Image: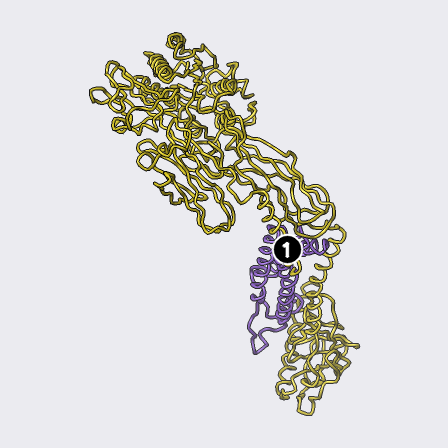
Chain colours: A purple, B yellow
């Protein structure tokens, strides 16, 4: 939104607001959820999850971290980031938070998808 | 999942009970196979293959043909020993190099001169370019396969070489009989696989040589001349060959490549005679012993043969017992217990130089047998069970004569219980050795007792679970294949049989091991197991696998345990009967039966799970975004209208214009829409974009509107304003008209002065912006 909003007279505003950046805590949490999703998905694959009707705990965890918690955290980050971008004092960090968050959530979502597939296989065998 | 866990536990209990019952059936609670074991049996006939290197390197390592003199010593000592014992030795002489060729045969002792004549031409046989170990061993295997009527201990390969496996002439015809490779380096590199396996890609052998040797059953005695005058190439060849030969003859019974036998090294050609003499004695079943021990005497009941080699060809030697000379000779002397019996007159047998001087080498063949005495039954629930054995000397066959039973004055005994050391005691009253098994026990233990003599070693071994002569422990039998069976149909796998480790010092098993399967049992009627072959045999000591098929006739989700009874038998090389070495049930793992997954159902479920999990956060985000895009509560804001003058795009407050408290009035509207003076509205617009900005829109029905302090650039009928504003000034203007309006929104707590300042800032900002815009437009016009 910085590109849509413009400060008409910055020097005319007596209270100069502090510049804001992207919220980092949600991005850190995205890193954790994505990593957890990948680890659980690998564990599930190694344990041949989905090969029987027994629903694998690892597959459920991979799905939960990647496709649910990860997306929720991403939504949270998106909300906070959107609000900050609307303040007019937003300064985008050099690490391109939108791209990083997008890649993280996409990778986590794919790992979660594999977990969901293994869960789906088990349910389909029931 | 809880239900499945309970089901699994219940199944495990049921099948475990079934397996225990099966074990009980397959293995009765008695030590049914009680028997004696003995040490190396005396051979009434020995077959010796003397295989002599004929490669060109001998010109360098043995230029004076000491190997021929050594072979003559070997043949004469074999003849002397055979004559003393009233036995015969069949000798086959062959050479190997670029090929392996039989040169002649003789039967000792009568044919000793003929045998010597056969080996003498080997002094000139030193022209072959290759030193082909594979051909040599293949020749030996073929030779001993033609002698099936002798135990393996009575079949001896005495193999002389001065170097290593080397191929300088790859066109030699014999090479094509074992490999398709033609490159010398590649052929040499294949040696390890040809001997120990797995067979290299180019091999045309039916199986690796060590397996063939064990299956055929013979003992390999390698005399390796390691001359210090080797060329660098010879040293490199030896470096490459040594690991393979070392493994083949390492004596490590747990190495599947190892075969019975050993290797001795002669550091010089002059040592060959001594080494050949020793190998001859070993071939006859004697083992080197300390000459001081032999001079002190071995217990007479144990002695089957002794040999002494003098320090010189003229040294007088003698074998005595009870003051009587049993044998005398010069150069060497040997005494063998007559086949007709007749124990030595004294309690011991001694041997050495007649004058007591030092001798060059001593060899002895001692033996005993262990015979069970009394009941050999073990009751599982008994508090203790005593097993008794009698040890008999050479020639004694009956335990009826208690005086013939040997005690601790003659032999030492040791015992193991299921592989762990266990006490064994001598009972003078019954003159038996006894082992007490403390009960109750769950399964019949395997008790092994070993008799040995001081200064000699093991004389005899027997086990409560083995037949005579057998020392093969039960192998491990296990399933190799899939354990998750999807849907119905047939599923292939293998039952692997892995030989048990052989205890240190125990003889390396030879011959053939067979496994015979009983009727497999299944915990579910819809699941069955079938073995491809009910009985299979492989060389002893070698792991092998048997194909098996599991058939599932009904799709289901369940856990099933399968059990297959088996009986393992061992037939040592030369033996004419199978010995049962183990019975039990193959320890198959639990199998998971599972229904096949329908791809469409799987895809739908996955899509549903992923779709819901993806949509929920997005819907939540959209809802939150829309919540954020609401206007402030109207009750928290005040609004005032400030008329402005406009001229050429520039606006200004009229003289004396000022806001007073009465001008600040409550805002009309709600959190979705503010209705403001001068026809201006602030509206909340709803969005389905989860990443939409948190803004509201200011709209003017009549004229353009601009917003301060934040706004989208320029004045339009609709402009976006941050939804979270605290104060806001909206300026409405109509191009060409001299009047404009400023609508100021401030918090309800704000004072009129603050509203005035906000209006002033907005007017200044819009004028400055207009100045910039008009300057830019003029520049464009110019």
In front: B83, or B202?
Answer: B83
Q: Position of residue A74 (x, y in %)?
A: 63, 64
Q: Is residue B193 visible?
A: no
Give the residue drawn at x 27%, y 16%: B328
* In the displayed structure image, the side of residue B707 where residue B464 appears, left or right: left
Kindly indicate the quadrant of the structure image that contains residue B320.
top left
Kindly indicate the quadrant of the structure image that contains residue A35.
bottom right
Above/below status of B76 relative to B642: above
* In the displayed structure image, the side of residue B315 where residue A43 appears, left or right: right
In front: B80, or B9?
Answer: B80
Chain hosting mark 1:
B
Provide the residue designation for mark 1. B8
Q: Secondary structure at mark 1?
A: helix
Q: Position of residue B13 (x, y in %)?
A: 61, 54
* In the displayed structure image, the side of residue B2 where residue B448 appears, left or right: left
Q: Is residue B618 visible?
A: yes
Above/below status of B252 relative to B594: above
Q: Position of residue B136 (x, y in %)?
A: 47, 19
Q: Position of residue B305 (x, y in %)?
A: 34, 23
Above/below status of B611 relative to B657: above
Which of the image's four quarters has the N terminus of chain B?
bottom right
Above/below status of B173 relative to B540: above
- Few, some or many residues within 10 Å of mark 1 (<14, 14–19, 20+): some
* In the displayed structure image, the side of residue B392 where residue B489 appears, left or right: right
In front: B110, or A90?
Answer: B110
């Amino acid at each position: 939104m910085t590109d849509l909003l413009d400060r008409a007279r910055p020097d005319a505003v007596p209270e100069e607001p502090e510049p804001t950046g992207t919220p980092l805590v949600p991005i850190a949490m995205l890193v954790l959820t994505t990593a957890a999703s990948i680890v659980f998905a690998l564990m599930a694959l190694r344990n041949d999850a989905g090969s029987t009707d027994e629903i694998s705990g690892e597959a459920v965890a991979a799905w939960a971290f990647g496709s649910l918690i990860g997306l929720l955290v991403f939504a949270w980050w998106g909300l906070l980031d959107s609000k900050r971008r609307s303040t007019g004092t937003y300064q985008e960090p050099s690490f391109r938070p939108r791209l990083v968050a997008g890649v993280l959530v996409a990778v986590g979502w794919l790992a979660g998808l594999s977990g969901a597939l293994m869960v789906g296989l088990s349910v389909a065998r029931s | 999942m809880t239900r499945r866990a309970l089901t699994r536990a219940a199944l495990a209990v049921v099948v475990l009970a079934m397996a225990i019952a099966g074990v009980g059936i397959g293995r009765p609670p008695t030590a049914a196979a009680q028997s004696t074991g003995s040490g190396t049996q005396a051979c009434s006939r020995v077959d010796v293959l003397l295989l002599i290197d004929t490669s060109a390197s001998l010109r360098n390592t043995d230029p004076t043909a000491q190997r021929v003199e050594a072979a003559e010593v070997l043949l004469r000592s074999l003849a002397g020993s055979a004559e003393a014992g009233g036995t015969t030795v069949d000798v086959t002489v062959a050479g190997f190099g670029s090929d392996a060729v039989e040169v002649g045969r003789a039967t000792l002792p009568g044919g000793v001169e003929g045998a010597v004549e056969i080996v003498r031409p080997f002094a000139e046989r030193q022209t072959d370019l290759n030193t082909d170990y594979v051909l040599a061993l293949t020749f030996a295997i073929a030779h001993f396969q033609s002698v099936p009527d002798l135990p393996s201990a009575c079949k001896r390969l005495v193999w002389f070489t001065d170097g290593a496996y080397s191929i300088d002439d790859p066109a030699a015809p014999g090479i094509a009989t074992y490999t398709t490779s033609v490159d010398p380096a590649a052929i040499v590199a294949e040696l390890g696989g040809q001997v120990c396996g797995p067979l290299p890609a180019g091999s045309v052998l039916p199986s690796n040589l060590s397996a063939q040797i064990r299956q055929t059953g013979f003992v390999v005695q390698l005399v390796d001349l390691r001359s210090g005058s080797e060329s660098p190439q010879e040293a490199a060849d030896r470096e490459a060959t040594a690991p393979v030969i070392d493994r083949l003859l390492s004596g490590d019974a747990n190495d599947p490549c190892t075969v019975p036998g050993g290797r001795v090294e002669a550091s010089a050609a002059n040592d060959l005679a001594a080494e050949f003499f020793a190998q001859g004695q070993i071939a006859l079943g004697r083992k080197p012993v300390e000459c001081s021990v032999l001079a002190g005497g071995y217990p007479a009941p144990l002695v089957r043969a002794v040999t002494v080699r003098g320090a010189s060809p003229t040294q007088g030697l003698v074998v005595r017992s009870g003051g009587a000379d049993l044998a005398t000779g010069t150069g060497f002397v040997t005494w063998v217990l007559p086949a007709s019996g007749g124990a030595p007159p004294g309690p011991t047998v001694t041997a050495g130089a007649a004058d007591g001087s030092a001798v060059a080498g001593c060899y002895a063949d001692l033996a005993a047998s262990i015979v069970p005495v009394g009941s050999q039954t073990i009751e599982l629930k008994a508090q203790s069970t005593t097993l008794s054995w009698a040890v008999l000397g050479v020639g004694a066959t009956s335990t009826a004569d208690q005086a013939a039973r040997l005690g601790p004055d003659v032999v030492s005994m040791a015992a193991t219980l299921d592989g762990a050391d266990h006490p064994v005691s001598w009972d003078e009253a019954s003159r038996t050795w006894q082992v007490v098994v403390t009960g109750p026990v769950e399964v019949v233990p395997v008790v092994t007792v070993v008799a040995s003599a001081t200064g000699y070693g093991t004389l005899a071994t027997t086990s409560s679970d083995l037949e005579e002569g057998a020392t093969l422990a039960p192998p491990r039998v296990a399933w190799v294949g899939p354990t998750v069976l999807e849907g119905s149909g047939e599923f292939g796998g293998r039952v692997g049989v892995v030989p048990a480790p052989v205890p240190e010092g125990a003889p390396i098993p030879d011959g053939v091991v067979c496994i015979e399967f009983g009727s497999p049992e299944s915990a579910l009627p819809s699941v069955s197991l079938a073995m491809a072959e009910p009985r299979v045999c492989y060389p002893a000591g070698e792991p092998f696998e048997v194909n098996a098929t599991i058939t599932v006739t009904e799709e289901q989700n369940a856990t099933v345990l399968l059990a297959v009874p088996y009986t393992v038998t061992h037939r040592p090389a030369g033996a004419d009967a199978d010995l049962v070495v183990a019975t039990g049930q193959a320890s198959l793992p639990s199998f998971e039966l599972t229904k096949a997954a329908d791809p469409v159902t799987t895809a739908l479920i996955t899509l549903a799970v992923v779709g819901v999990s993806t949509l929920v956060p997005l819907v939540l985000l959209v809802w939150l975004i829309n919540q954020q895009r609401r206007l402030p509560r109207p009750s928290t804001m005040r609004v005032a209208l400030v008329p402005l003058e406009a001229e050429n795009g520039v606006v200004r407050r009229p003289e004396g214009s000022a806001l007073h408290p009465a001008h600040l009035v409550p805002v009309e509207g709600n959190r979705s829409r503010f209705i403001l003076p001068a026809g201006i509205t602030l509206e909340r617009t709803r969005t389905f974009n989860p990443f939409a900005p948190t803004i509201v829109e200011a709209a003017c029905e009549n004229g353009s509107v601009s917003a301060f302090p934040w706004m989208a650039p320029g004045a339009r009928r609709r402009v976006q304003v941050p939804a979270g504003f605290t104060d806001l000034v909206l300026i409405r203007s109509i191009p060409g008209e001299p009047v404009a309006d400023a609508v100021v929104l401030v918090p309800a707590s704000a004072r009129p002065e603050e509203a005035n300042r906000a209006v002033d800032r907005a007017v200044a900002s819009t004028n400055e912006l207009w100045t910039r815009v008009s300057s830019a437009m003029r520049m464009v016009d110019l």
